[in-house]
Each structure stands twice: as structure tokens, then as C-alpha cells.
């Protein structure tokens, strides 16, 4: 590892890839989860039956269940065979959509998008209700859970995005949010255009891995844990982690355009997906509210700099974030009153940034 400061920071990090279920459905805080501490009316639309009142079976910490790799030859690198299923609201899925587009692999890997709003009262699965007939046009399925159960008929955990599906079999083959970009960057080089950035350069791999773990635990993971807020002390622990790390990143970005100098790497993607949701979601909804992103000059300009790149901006959808985090699902308003915030003003992301002027 060339950057010894990363090694020192990593010594204080306990890394895990297991995630708690989304605070929007499972937090004990009624700000994060408007249905906390209550039973919900039952719904059945003829296709999907509500299960919110039995949600505890989906509440456990859960890591990726499908980790087949391209880099070890388990999965064949075959163009037009795989389909990324993701949701625009989800930061874990968003990172893979950005990575595929940055690498130019959108020409050989298709993508399908699930609705950020589940059917009324449903948890634990995602649905293709944005598509004609409520069915994914390539996979021919109504819910992502169908592809999970094709891969494992006994599967009864949460279905999560991102999910990479083999279109020849209809099975999920990989839902490892933390390693899929790396897999694509290493194994799909034959299909990556020369103009695409090297997201995982050989000379920086150990440094990238270290900083990715730091950001995973102190930013990506920590904002969700703050949203669960199991006690004041627990909430404060994660709150402090987030802002101590944001201060550290603000200082790092004072001297370079991206997290590793003048080149974009996969760790920039991993940080961006939390930053792009920070003021809209985490600041307001999870009480991670010491400062807003816009109050950090370097981080804010860095985030706008990335947003200006089509792979980032085109895959950033603030309306989907509002839908999932504030509207929650398709439960009728009269059964679950909620207010959808009109701000912050999304147009400020289009404003100029100072990164090119400062760093060229």
C-alpha cells in the first residue's frame, strides 16, 4: 500500500458486507420509518399481497448471497448475456449502474429497473411495475424474487438490488454490491473502450481496497445505521463516524480532484452514491444533520464535478429517492398520511463547480 495514512485509518475499521434491512421499513424511529410500532392494513391487488405485518422475517442483517465471479472463470464473459437489475433510489445498486456506464459496458450488459415504490404493504422484494404489464421485458418476470428463487428454490430472505441476472437461465448469479464493479473492471477489458477510465488500476489496488473499506463502513454503512438509531448512544456513534470521516475527506479533496489524484476510480463511485443522497435523505430523514453536503466546499464541488459526467448524472434520479424514502410504497395516502419534501432544490447540482479550475 503506497498511502500509509490509509493503513493507519484502516486499523480502526471493522469491515463487514452484511447490511441491516432498510430503515424505511425497519427502523424503530417514526421519522425514518413512518410505520414503526404499528400494524398496517392488509392489501391484495390480485398479484401481490401485503406482508408488512410479518416483516420481522426480513429484518436480519444480510450479506450478498450470490457471488459467482467472472475473474475466476465461474461466469463466462459473454456480451449481451447478463442483465443488471437495480433501482434508481438505492445507493448500493446505483454504484453498479454508474460503473457499467463509466466502463462503456452498457453496450454489452443490459439493465432493468424495478419500481422504487413497492405494492402497498409489501416488503422483502422488488417489482417491475414500471414496465408494460408489470413484467421485465427481457426476463419476463413480475418480481425480482422470481429470479432469486430460480437460482435457489429455497431462497426466503430479502431480495436485494443490485442483482446481476443470467438471461439464458433467468437466475441471479451475483448480488455482491461491493465487488461487482471490480469484477467488470478486471474481467471485461475486451469490451471496455480505450476512452473509458481505469477504475481499478493495478498500481493503486491495495490503496483503493483500503479506502473503499473506510468509506464503506464510515459513510455508506454508517448513514444507514444512524437511521436505525436503536438508542441515543447507538445513533451518536454512527453520527460521529459519518462526520469525522466527512471532515477527513474534505481535507483529502482539498489537494486533489478525485480521491486518488487526477483519475476517477471505483472508490469515487462508492462515495458519490451516498453524497448524492445526503442532503435529500440522510440529513433530513436519518438525523445525520450536523452539516449538509453543500456546507463542505471541497466535497460539494467534487460531487457536482462527478454529477456532470453522464455516467453519474444520468444515473442519479432525485425523484426516485423522494419516492422511496418519503412516499415509501403504494399504500394509499388515506391509510398512511405522509408529506413528500419539495426540497432541496435539485437544480443546484447543475451549477458550475471549481474542480477543473483548481486541478486542471
Image: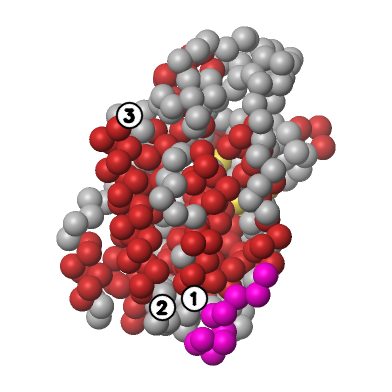
Give the Cα separation between the discs numbered 2 and 1.
16 Å
Residue 69 in picture, x, y percent from top left: 43, 56
Residue 275 in picture, x, y percent from top left: 50, 57
In this view, the residue in front, 188 or 278, is 278
Q: How many residues crowd mark 2 within 10 Å: few (<14), some (14–19), many (20+)?
A: some
In this view, the residue in front, 80 or 142, is 142
Which residues are drawn in magenta?
351-360
For marks 2 and 1, the one nearer the N-term is 2
Asked if residue 303 lies left or right of residue 323, the reply is left
**Mark 3, secondary structure of its residue:** loop
Residue in the picture at 32% in, 66% down: 248
Residue in the picture at 42% in, 45% down: 288
Residue 295 in picture, x, y percent from top left: 49, 62
In this view, the residue in front, 76 or 98, is 98
Is 355 part of what is drawn in magenta? yes
Q: Which residue is mark 2?
A: 254
Give the Cα separation between the discs numbered 3 and 2.
35 Å
Amino acid at each position: 500500500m503506497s498511502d500509509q495514512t490509509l493503513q493507519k485509518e484502516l486499523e480502526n475499521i471493522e469491515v463487514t458486507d452484511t447490511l441491516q434491512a432498510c430503515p424505511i421499513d425497519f427502523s424503530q424511529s417514526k421519522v425514518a420509518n413512518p410505520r414503526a410500532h404499528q400494524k398496517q392494513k392488509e392489501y391484495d391487488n390480485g398479484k401481490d399481497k401485503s406482508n408488512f405485518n410479518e416483516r420481522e422475517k426480513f429484518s436480519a442483517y444480510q450479506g450478498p448471497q450470490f457471488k459467482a465471479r467472472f475473474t475466476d472463470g465461474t461466469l463466462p464473459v459473454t456480451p449481451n448475456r447478463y442483465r443488471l437489475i437495480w433501482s434508481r433510489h438505492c445507493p448500493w445498486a446505483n454504484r453498479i449502474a454508474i460503473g457499467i456506464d463509466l466502463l462503456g459496458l452498457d453496450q454489452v450488459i443490459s439493465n432493468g429497473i424495478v419500481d422504487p415504490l413497492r405494492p402497498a404493504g409489501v416488503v422483502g422484494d422488488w417489482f417491475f411495475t414500471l414496465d408494460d404489464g408489470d413484467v421485465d421485458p427481457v426476463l419476463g418476470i413480475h418480481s425480482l424474487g422470481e429470479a432469486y428463487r430460480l437460482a435457489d428454490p429455497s431462497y426466503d430472505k430479502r431480495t436485494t438490488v443490485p442483482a446481476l441476472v443470467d438471461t439464458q437461465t433467468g437466475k441471479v448469479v451475483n448480488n455482491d454490491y461491493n465487488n461487482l464493479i471490480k469484477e467488470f473492471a478486471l474481467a471485461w477489458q475486451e469490451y471496455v473502450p480505450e476512452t473509458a477510465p481505469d477504475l481499478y488500476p493495478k498500481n493503486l489496488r491495495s490503496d483503493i481496497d483500503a479506502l473503499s473499506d473506510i468509506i464503506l463502513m464510515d459513510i455508506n454503512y454508517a448513514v444507514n445505521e444512524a437511521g436505525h438509531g436503536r438508542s441515543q448512544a447507538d445513533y451518536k456513534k454512527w453520527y460521529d463516524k459519518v462526520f469525522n470521516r466527512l471532515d477527513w475527506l474534505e481535507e483529502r479533496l482539498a489537494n486533489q480532484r478525485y480521491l486518488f489524484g487526477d483519475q476517477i476510480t471505483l472508490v469515487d463511485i462508492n462515495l458519490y452514491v451516498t453524497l448524492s443522497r445526503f442532503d435529500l435523505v440522510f440529513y433530513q430523514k436519518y438525523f445525520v444533520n450536523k452539516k449538509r453536503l453543500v456546507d463542505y466546499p471541497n466535497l460539494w464541488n467534487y460531487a457536482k464535478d462527478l454529477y456532470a459526467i453522464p455516467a453519474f448524472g444520468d444515473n442519479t434520479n432525485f425523484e426516485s429517492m423522494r419516492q422511496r424514502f418519503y412516499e415509501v410504497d403504494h399504500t394509499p395516502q388515506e391509510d398512511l398520511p405522509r408529506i413528500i419534501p419539495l426540497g432541496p432544490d435539485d437544480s443546484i447540482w447543475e451549477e458550475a463547480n471549481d474542480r477543473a479550475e483548481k486541478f486542471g
